[in-house]
Amino acid sequence: ELEMADVIVTFYGLGFDLKMLNSRLMYWGVQPLSPRLHVDLYRLGKRYFNTTRRNLETITKHLGIKGKNHVDIELWKEAKINGDKRAINYIVRHMVLDLEITEKLFLRLKSLIKSISLA
């Protein structure tokens, strides 16, 4: 799906997500994601917000965007080590919620975008 995208929008994707994804793809002998246009909302947050922290939770709370939740470390362990279906389903739901609030954040911040990088 990502290979078909014209632009990728993330929050801290350049600092974590793309590195994680590409390292795992290469580990499994799959080509890493080819470079494409990328908007990292973390960079906009860092530039335009003077909040105590500049993570997704703090910036979305500041803008009144609800929905950020957290995954207990024990659920991550259950999913990874034991393949626990309940834990995996919870984590997938968490990821979907993060995508939804990232989309809402993008819609709020898009007017601040001055350039789009190739990543």
Image (tube, rainbow, N blue to C red):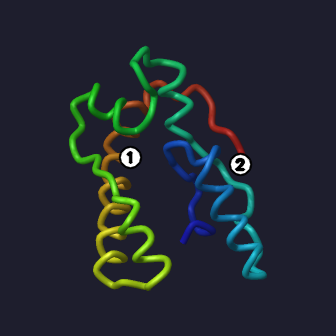
Q: Is residue 9 above or below residue 82?
A: above
Relative horizontal placement of residue 107, taking residue 7 as reference (left or right): left
* Residue 89 image label: none
Name which residue lies at 72% across and 65% down.
Answer: 23
| Residue beneath disc 2 | 119
Tell me residue 43's x, y (percent). 56, 31
Amino acid beneath label 1: Thr
Residue, x 47% and y 18% (percent of image)? 48
**Vertical order, 67 against 1 (above or below):** above
For residue 64, side relative to residue 76 (left or right)? left
Which residue, given by chain and number where applicable, does mark 1 sit on?
A: 102
Residue 116 rendering spot, x and y as whole percentages: 63, 37
**From the viewer's perspective, is residue 38 above or below residue 44?**
below
Q: Nearer the viewer, residue 63 or 72?
A: 72
Q: Eyeballing the image, is 11 above or below 108?
A: below
Total count of labels: 2
Neighbor class of circle 1 (other Cα within 10 Å; few <14, some 14-19, many 20+) is many
In depth, the one of 24 and 86 nearer the eye is: 86
Q: Residue at x 31, y 34 (%)?
A: 60
- The percent position of residue 44, horizontal first and vertical second, equals 51, 28
Residues tagged 1 and 2 counted as in contact (Cβ below 8 A)? no
What is the crowding at mark 2: few (fewer than 14 residues within 10 Å), some, or many (at least 20)? some
Q: Residue at x 49, y 77 (%)?
A: 80
Quadrant location of residue 29? bottom right
Q: How far apart are labels 1 and 2 at the CA level?
A: 18 Å
